[in-house]
Image: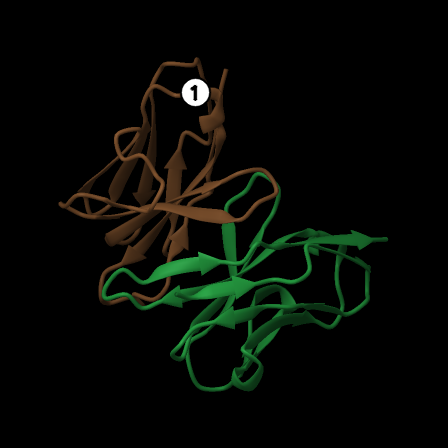
Chain colours: A green, B brown
Amino acid sequence: AQSVTQPDIHITVSEGASLELRCNYSYGATPYLFWYVQSPGQGLQLLLKYFSGDTLVQGIKGFEAEFKRSQSSFNLRKPSVHWSDAAEYFCAVVAHTGTASKLTFGTGTRLQVTL
Amino acid sequence: GAVVSQHPSWVICKSGTSVKIECRSLDFQATTMFWYRQFPKQSLMLMATSNEGSKATYEQGVEKDKFLINHASLTLSTLTVTSAHPEDSSFYICSARARAWRDVREQYFGPGTRLTVT
Protein backbone atom coordinates (compact mmCIF):
# COMPACT_ATOMS: atom_id res chain seq x y z
CA ALA A 1 0.00 0.00 0.00
CA GLN A 2 1.09 3.54 -0.63
CA SER A 3 2.20 5.87 2.16
CA VAL A 4 3.48 9.38 2.59
CA THR A 5 5.85 10.64 5.26
CA GLN A 6 6.36 14.24 6.22
CA PRO A 7 9.18 14.15 8.76
CA ASP A 8 8.76 17.69 10.01
CA ILE A 9 5.69 18.33 12.12
CA HIS A 10 6.42 22.00 12.67
CA ILE A 11 8.81 24.40 10.95
CA THR A 12 9.49 28.04 11.75
CA VAL A 13 11.19 30.35 9.27
CA SER A 14 11.74 34.07 9.11
CA GLU A 15 9.95 36.09 6.51
CA GLY A 16 12.13 36.36 3.43
CA ALA A 17 14.04 33.19 4.18
CA SER A 18 13.96 30.14 1.95
CA LEU A 19 11.79 27.14 2.73
CA GLU A 20 11.95 23.43 2.07
CA LEU A 21 9.30 21.02 3.29
CA ARG A 22 10.14 17.37 3.04
CA CYS A 23 7.96 14.61 1.67
CA ASN A 24 8.84 10.96 1.14
CA TYR A 25 6.51 8.46 -0.44
CA SER A 26 6.28 4.73 -0.70
CA TYR A 27 4.64 3.37 -3.81
CA GLY A 28 5.48 0.57 -6.18
CA ALA A 29 4.84 2.32 -9.46
CA THR A 30 5.28 5.89 -10.71
CA PRO A 31 3.30 7.99 -8.29
CA TYR A 32 1.05 10.92 -8.84
CA LEU A 33 2.09 13.45 -6.21
CA PHE A 34 0.46 16.56 -4.84
CA TRP A 35 1.12 19.36 -2.40
CA TYR A 36 -1.82 21.08 -0.71
CA VAL A 37 -2.00 24.01 1.67
CA GLN A 38 -4.63 24.48 4.34
CA SER A 39 -5.23 27.67 6.27
CA PRO A 40 -6.88 27.37 9.69
CA GLY A 41 -10.51 26.32 9.41
CA GLN A 42 -10.32 26.15 5.64
CA GLY A 43 -10.35 23.47 3.00
CA LEU A 44 -7.40 22.39 0.90
CA GLN A 45 -5.87 24.39 -1.90
CA LEU A 46 -3.74 22.65 -4.51
CA LEU A 47 -0.26 24.14 -4.75
CA LEU A 48 1.17 21.87 -7.41
CA LYS A 49 1.16 18.35 -8.77
CA TYR A 50 3.45 15.90 -10.50
CA PHE A 51 2.18 13.30 -12.92
CA SER A 52 5.06 12.80 -15.34
CA GLY A 53 7.67 14.65 -17.38
CA ASP A 54 9.85 17.41 -16.00
CA THR A 55 10.73 16.51 -12.44
CA LEU A 56 10.78 20.13 -11.30
CA VAL A 57 7.24 21.43 -11.16
CA GLN A 58 6.12 24.96 -10.61
CA GLY A 59 3.04 25.80 -8.61
CA ILE A 60 1.06 28.73 -7.41
CA LYS A 61 2.24 31.35 -4.93
CA GLY A 62 5.88 30.91 -5.95
CA PHE A 63 6.17 27.30 -4.79
CA GLU A 64 8.00 24.56 -6.62
CA ALA A 65 8.69 20.91 -5.94
CA GLU A 66 11.17 18.41 -7.29
CA PHE A 67 10.41 14.74 -7.83
CA LYS A 68 13.41 12.54 -7.10
CA ARG A 69 12.68 8.93 -7.86
CA SER A 70 15.99 7.68 -6.45
CA GLN A 71 15.16 9.24 -3.09
CA SER A 72 11.39 8.66 -3.23
CA SER A 73 10.99 12.31 -2.40
CA PHE A 74 8.88 15.23 -3.51
CA ASN A 75 10.10 18.18 -1.47
CA LEU A 76 8.36 21.55 -1.62
CA ARG A 77 10.45 24.71 -1.85
CA LYS A 78 10.01 28.44 -1.91
CA PRO A 79 12.93 30.86 -2.25
CA SER A 80 11.45 33.63 -0.12
CA VAL A 81 8.66 33.04 2.38
CA HIS A 82 5.93 35.58 3.05
CA TRP A 83 4.04 35.91 6.32
CA SER A 84 0.88 34.83 4.50
CA ASP A 85 2.46 31.44 3.79
CA ALA A 86 1.91 30.41 7.41
CA ALA A 87 -0.39 27.40 7.17
CA GLU A 88 -0.51 23.60 7.21
CA TYR A 89 1.04 21.84 4.23
CA PHE A 90 0.10 18.35 3.13
CA CYS A 91 1.87 16.08 0.69
CA ALA A 92 -0.31 13.41 -0.94
CA VAL A 93 -0.02 10.51 -3.35
CA VAL A 94 -2.65 8.88 -5.51
CA ALA A 95 -2.82 5.12 -5.50
CA HIS A 96 -4.16 3.46 -8.59
CA THR A 97 -6.71 0.95 -7.47
CA GLY A 98 -8.84 0.63 -10.56
CA THR A 99 -11.07 3.64 -10.77
CA ALA A 100 -10.82 4.42 -7.09
CA SER A 101 -7.64 6.51 -7.27
CA LYS A 102 -7.57 7.27 -3.60
CA LEU A 103 -5.48 10.07 -2.19
CA THR A 104 -3.23 9.23 0.73
CA PHE A 105 -2.08 12.21 2.78
CA GLY A 106 0.97 12.75 4.88
CA THR A 107 0.57 13.93 8.44
CA GLY A 108 1.22 17.54 7.49
CA THR A 109 3.81 20.18 8.32
CA ARG A 110 2.76 23.32 10.12
CA LEU A 111 4.67 26.35 8.89
CA GLN A 112 5.12 29.33 11.15
CA VAL A 113 6.60 32.53 9.74
CA THR A 114 8.25 35.03 12.01
CA LEU A 115 8.50 38.68 11.08
CA GLY B 1 -13.52 26.16 -12.81
CA ALA B 2 -13.70 22.96 -10.72
CA VAL B 3 -15.40 24.50 -7.71
CA VAL B 4 -16.76 22.36 -4.90
CA SER B 5 -19.02 23.75 -2.23
CA GLN B 6 -20.14 22.40 1.11
CA HIS B 7 -23.14 23.32 3.17
CA PRO B 8 -23.28 24.17 5.96
CA SER B 9 -19.82 25.53 6.67
CA TRP B 10 -20.37 24.93 10.36
CA VAL B 11 -23.09 23.27 12.41
CA ILE B 12 -23.77 22.68 16.08
CA CYS B 13 -26.15 19.91 17.05
CA LYS B 14 -27.23 18.16 20.19
CA SER B 15 -26.13 14.68 21.05
CA GLY B 16 -28.47 12.06 19.62
CA THR B 17 -29.65 14.12 16.67
CA SER B 18 -28.69 13.68 13.03
CA VAL B 19 -27.06 16.21 10.77
CA LYS B 20 -26.71 16.31 7.00
CA ILE B 21 -23.79 17.83 5.13
CA GLU B 22 -24.02 18.58 1.42
CA CYS B 23 -21.21 18.54 -1.09
CA ARG B 24 -21.81 20.02 -4.53
CA SER B 25 -19.69 20.30 -7.64
CA LEU B 26 -20.71 23.65 -9.05
CA ASP B 27 -19.28 23.71 -12.54
CA PHE B 28 -18.55 20.11 -13.40
CA GLN B 29 -20.04 16.66 -13.09
CA ALA B 30 -18.44 14.46 -10.50
CA THR B 31 -18.41 10.75 -11.10
CA THR B 32 -16.84 10.16 -7.72
CA MET B 33 -16.93 12.05 -4.47
CA PHE B 34 -14.84 11.44 -1.40
CA TRP B 35 -15.53 12.23 2.24
CA TYR B 36 -12.71 12.94 4.65
CA ARG B 37 -12.57 13.58 8.35
CA GLN B 38 -9.95 15.75 10.00
CA PHE B 39 -9.35 16.01 13.73
CA PRO B 40 -7.65 19.14 15.08
CA LYS B 41 -4.02 19.41 14.02
CA GLN B 42 -4.19 16.08 12.22
CA SER B 43 -4.23 14.92 8.65
CA LEU B 44 -7.21 14.04 6.50
CA MET B 45 -8.52 10.52 6.82
CA LEU B 46 -10.62 9.10 4.02
CA MET B 47 -13.97 7.91 5.30
CA ALA B 48 -15.69 6.75 2.15
CA THR B 49 -15.83 6.92 -1.61
CA SER B 50 -19.13 7.40 -3.37
CA ASN B 51 -19.97 6.92 -7.00
CA GLU B 52 -23.07 8.41 -8.51
CA GLY B 53 -25.95 5.99 -8.43
CA SER B 54 -24.25 3.29 -6.39
CA LYS B 55 -23.51 2.48 -2.79
CA ALA B 56 -20.61 4.15 -1.08
CA THR B 57 -17.45 2.24 -0.27
CA TYR B 58 -16.38 2.79 3.31
CA GLU B 59 -12.87 2.63 4.66
CA GLN B 60 -12.03 0.14 7.34
CA GLY B 61 -13.23 1.22 10.74
CA VAL B 62 -15.86 3.66 9.48
CA GLU B 63 -19.40 2.79 10.56
CA LYS B 64 -21.56 2.88 7.47
CA ASP B 65 -24.77 2.91 9.51
CA LYS B 66 -23.59 5.98 11.36
CA PHE B 67 -22.20 7.91 8.43
CA LEU B 68 -24.77 7.61 5.66
CA ILE B 69 -23.60 8.72 2.25
CA ASN B 70 -25.84 9.37 -0.71
CA HIS B 71 -24.61 10.35 -4.17
CA ALA B 72 -27.90 10.84 -5.95
CA SER B 73 -26.69 12.97 -8.83
CA LEU B 74 -23.51 13.89 -10.65
CA THR B 75 -23.28 17.15 -8.73
CA LEU B 76 -24.44 16.29 -5.23
CA SER B 77 -23.33 13.98 -2.45
CA THR B 78 -24.57 14.09 1.11
CA LEU B 79 -23.12 12.82 4.36
CA THR B 80 -25.54 12.27 7.21
CA VAL B 81 -24.14 11.75 10.67
CA THR B 82 -26.81 9.80 12.50
CA SER B 83 -27.30 9.88 16.26
CA ALA B 84 -24.35 12.18 16.63
CA HIS B 85 -22.20 12.12 19.73
CA PRO B 86 -19.51 14.52 20.94
CA GLU B 87 -16.78 12.22 19.60
CA ASP B 88 -18.20 12.84 16.10
CA SER B 89 -17.22 16.48 16.39
CA SER B 90 -14.71 17.09 13.65
CA PHE B 91 -13.97 18.89 10.40
CA TYR B 92 -15.53 17.08 7.45
CA ILE B 93 -14.17 17.74 3.97
CA CYS B 94 -15.47 16.44 0.68
CA SER B 95 -13.75 16.25 -2.65
CA ALA B 96 -14.92 15.46 -6.13
CA ARG B 97 -13.36 13.86 -9.15
CA ALA B 98 -14.60 14.91 -12.53
CA ARG B 99 -15.70 13.01 -15.55
CA ALA B 100 -13.32 12.04 -18.32
CA TRP B 101 -12.81 15.41 -19.92
CA ARG B 102 -10.92 16.53 -16.83
CA ASP B 103 -7.97 14.77 -15.31
CA VAL B 104 -9.41 11.90 -13.32
CA ARG B 105 -6.30 11.75 -11.18
CA GLU B 106 -7.14 15.05 -9.55
CA GLN B 107 -9.61 15.74 -6.78
CA TYR B 108 -11.17 19.12 -6.11
CA PHE B 109 -11.82 19.91 -2.47
CA GLY B 110 -14.66 21.66 -0.74
CA PRO B 111 -14.07 24.22 2.02
CA GLY B 112 -15.06 21.84 4.80
CA THR B 113 -17.81 21.67 7.42
CA ARG B 114 -17.10 22.08 11.10
CA LEU B 115 -19.41 19.83 13.15
CA THR B 116 -19.71 20.34 16.88
CA VAL B 117 -21.89 17.96 18.87
CA THR B 118 -22.88 19.16 22.33
Taking the spot 77% from the left edge, 70% from the top edge, the residue there is A18
Relative placement, left or right, of B111 versus B23 is right
Q: Residue furthest right?
A: A115
Give the letter of the chain under mark 1.
B
Is B59 rendered above or below residue B70? below
Q: Nearer the viewer, residue A26 or B14?
A: A26
Q: Quadrant of the N terminus of chain B?
A: bottom left
Locate residue A5: give its quadrant: bottom right
Q: Amino acid at mark 1?
A: His
Query: Which residue corresponds to the image point at 68% horizontal and 54% vertical from the top-left?
Result: A9
Q: Is residue B72 left or right of residue B58?
A: left
In the image, is residue A66 above or below residue B67?
below
Give percent across and percent down for residue B51: 21, 50
Q: Is residue A47 visible?
A: no
Where residue B11 sits in the image (x, y, percent)? 45, 23
Tell me residue A2's x, y (percent). 42, 66
Q: Secondary structure at mark 1?
A: loop
Q: Measured along the vertical axis of the image, is residue B51 above or below residue B117?
A: below
Compared to residue A111, the image places residue B63 above or below, namely: above
Q: Nearer the viewer, residue B28 or A79?
A: A79
Instruction: Return the residue at label 1.
Output: B85
* Percent of width and height locating residue A26: 48, 71
Q: Does the image show residue B28?
A: yes
Q: Nearer the viewer, residue B44 or B12?
A: B44
Residue at horizontal 43%, vertical 20%?
A: B85
Q: Is residue A22 left or right of residue A69?
A: right
How many marks do you count on the picture? 1
